[in-house]
Amino acid sequence: MRSGLLIAVAAGLFLLVPWLQARGWGGLLPWLLAAWLGIRALREPRRGLRLLWLALAAALASGAWWLGAGVVRWVPAVTFALLAWLFGRTLWHPPPLIERMVRLQFADIPPYLLAYLRRLTALWCAFFVAAALISAALTLLGSERAWAGFHGLGIWLALGLLIGAEYLYRRRRFPQLDRMPPPHETFREIARHGKAFWLD
């Protein structure tokens, strides 16, 4: 429960980045995120991950001290890069991440689906790589309005389009499947399993 609350807080802070940045309140976010990472480190039993969270918290706090609110503009790009890594690493260390998601709801996956799930994992990895590159380019070269527009609206429209298009394609491509859960059911299972799902 507490782990879920911490994840919810982090997600909320991430969603607030463009909104607060556009209103000139972005200076608060680096400190809030650093505090969240510090709490995360204190709750982490594994030494390696605990040191990682502490290092990230220290880096974020140092960046906020020296660079001010500007450091928060890099948070989305780093987040997208981390998501790309989470998806990509499972392509080299199977099972692929999308296959793990499916196994949360179906113990036995038909063999003809396994290759599709691997390709879908690669697609999501590529999506987040592209998002990280666009975010970094806007952070370095884009206007404040373009940065806020991409992170406050554009990326969420792209996410919704990809999720919806994949769901519709899957229904057409694999009509023989008895029941395909809608995306919100899958997300609920992922949230329920927490970090064990992402870092297993």
Image (spheres, helix red, strand yellow):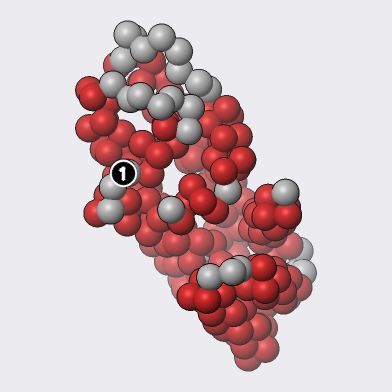
- Picture residue at 32% right of the left edge, 8% below the top: 176
Task: From the viewer's perspective, tell me whether residue 97 is left or right of residue 42.
Answer: left
Residue 84 percent coordinates (x, y): 39, 55
Whether residue 138 appears in this view of the structure is no
* Above or below for 83 versus 46: above
- Picture residue at 58% right of the left edge, 29% below the top: 184
Residue 69 is drawn in which quadrant? Answer: bottom right
Residue 165 percent coordinates (x, y): 41, 26
Residue 143 is drawn in which quadrant? Answer: bottom right
Residue 128 percent coordinates (x, y): 40, 52
Front-lying residue, 141 or 42 = 42
Q: Which residue is mark 1?
A: 95
* Above or below for 147 versus 116: below
* Above or below for 76 versus 35: above
Residue 193 percent coordinates (x, y): 57, 43
Q: Residues within 10 Å of mark 1 (few under 14, many from 20)?
A: some
Front-lying residue, 120 or 139 = 120
Under mark 1, the amino acid is Pro
- Picture residue at 42% right of the left edge, 66% below the top: 137
Task: From the viewer's perspective, tell me whether residue 101 is left or right of residue 96.
Answer: right
Q: Residue furthest front?
A: 45
Whether residue 111 appears in this view of the structure is yes
Disc 1 secondary structure class: loop
* Above or below for 33 versus 147: below
